[in-house]
Image (cartoon, grey):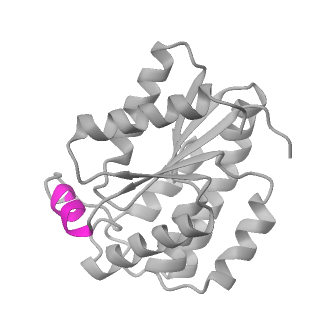
């Protein structure tokens, strides 16, 4: 499906700071006059936010990995239909906190589902839509977990053990190797202001440089 806008996603393990950085980038770009739509997954829509609460509820520890996968895909289907595609057709810049790379890294990696199970769902449902640019905020899992444990409460994904988060990070880096031209790896172990400046510089380079 053709689109005219720009689709930029942020990815990373828990504690990487991606949610704070995508909000800051959105604010900066809006100040400069760029037409930006900020959204997130899971969620982004009324229906999606309800599914998000179901997925992340720490009481749902018994959730089967396939159930989790299908819930994520359900909220994405609604999200694409209701928010992402309409904004792109209006020639806007869509900044999305997580997209299908999270599905590969978390459900295909952290949950141990075979990529042969995950891939057909993504290709059949969403083959027409892929990010133009993806920021991977890369951080050592130990540092990321130290950051999230400063929060008042942890969701179901936050509460997973170190091995889970290490596997997710490893899968993200494998995705980068498969599509190096789409990804920008940002070292998120550093101070917030340094990381943000790197993201802003890369965003400007992509948005104002030669047509990709």
Indicate yes or no whether the magenta region holds residue 155.
no
Q: Is residue 47 above or below residue 64?
A: above
- The residue at 41%/38% (across/down) is 199
- The residue at 31%/62% (across/down) is 155
- The residue at 67%/83% (across/down) is 117
Q: Is residue 208 above or below residue 148?
A: above
33 relative to 18 in the view: left or right: right
The range drawn in magenta is 141-148
54 relative to 151 in the view: left or right: right
- The residue at 48%/74% (across/down) is 171
Indicate yes or no whether the magenta region holds residue 145.
yes
- In the current view of this chain or complex, which residue is farthest to the right? 1
Residue 2 versus residue 55: which sits nearer the camera? Answer: 2
**Residue 121 position within the rendered picture, expressed as x and y whole percent measured from the top left:** 72, 71
Q: Is residue 94 above or below residue 104?
A: above
Residue 202 versus residue 78: which sits nearer the camera? Answer: 202
Image quarter hosting the C terminus? top right
Q: Quadrant of residue 159?
A: bottom left
127 relative to 187 in the view: left or right: right
Classified by dominant secondary structure, the portion drawn in magenta counts as helix
**Residue 52 position within the rendered picture, expressed as x and y whole percent measured from the top left:** 48, 55
**Residue 200 position within the rendered picture, expressed as x and y whole percent measured from the top left:** 42, 31
């Amino acid at each position: 499906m053709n689109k005219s806008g720009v689709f930029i996603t942020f990815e990373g393990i828990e504690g990487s700071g991606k949610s704070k950085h995508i909000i800051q980038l959105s604010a900066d770009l809006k100040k400069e006059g760029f037409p930006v739509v900020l959204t997130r997954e899971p969620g982004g829509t009324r229906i999606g936010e309800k599914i998000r609460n179901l997925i992340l509820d720490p009481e749902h520890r018994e959730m089967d990995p396939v159930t989790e996968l299908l819930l994520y895909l359900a909220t994405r289907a609604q999200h694409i239909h209701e928010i992402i595609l309409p904004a792109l057709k209006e020639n806007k810049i869509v900044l999305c906190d997580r997209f299908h790379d999270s599905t590969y890294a978390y459900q295909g990696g952290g949950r141990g589902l075979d990529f042969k199970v995950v891939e057909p769902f993504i290709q059949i449902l969403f083959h027409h839509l892929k990010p133009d640019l993806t920021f991977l905020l890369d951080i050592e899992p130990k540092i990321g977990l130290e950051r999230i444990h400063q929060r008042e409460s942890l969701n179901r994904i936050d509460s997973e053990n170190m091995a889970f988060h290490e596997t997710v990070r490893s899968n993200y880096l494998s995705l980068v190797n498969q599509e190096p031209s789409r990804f920008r790896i940002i070292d998120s172990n550093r101070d917030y202001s340094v990381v943000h400046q790197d993201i802003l510089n890369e965003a400007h380079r992509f948005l104002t440089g030669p047509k990709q």
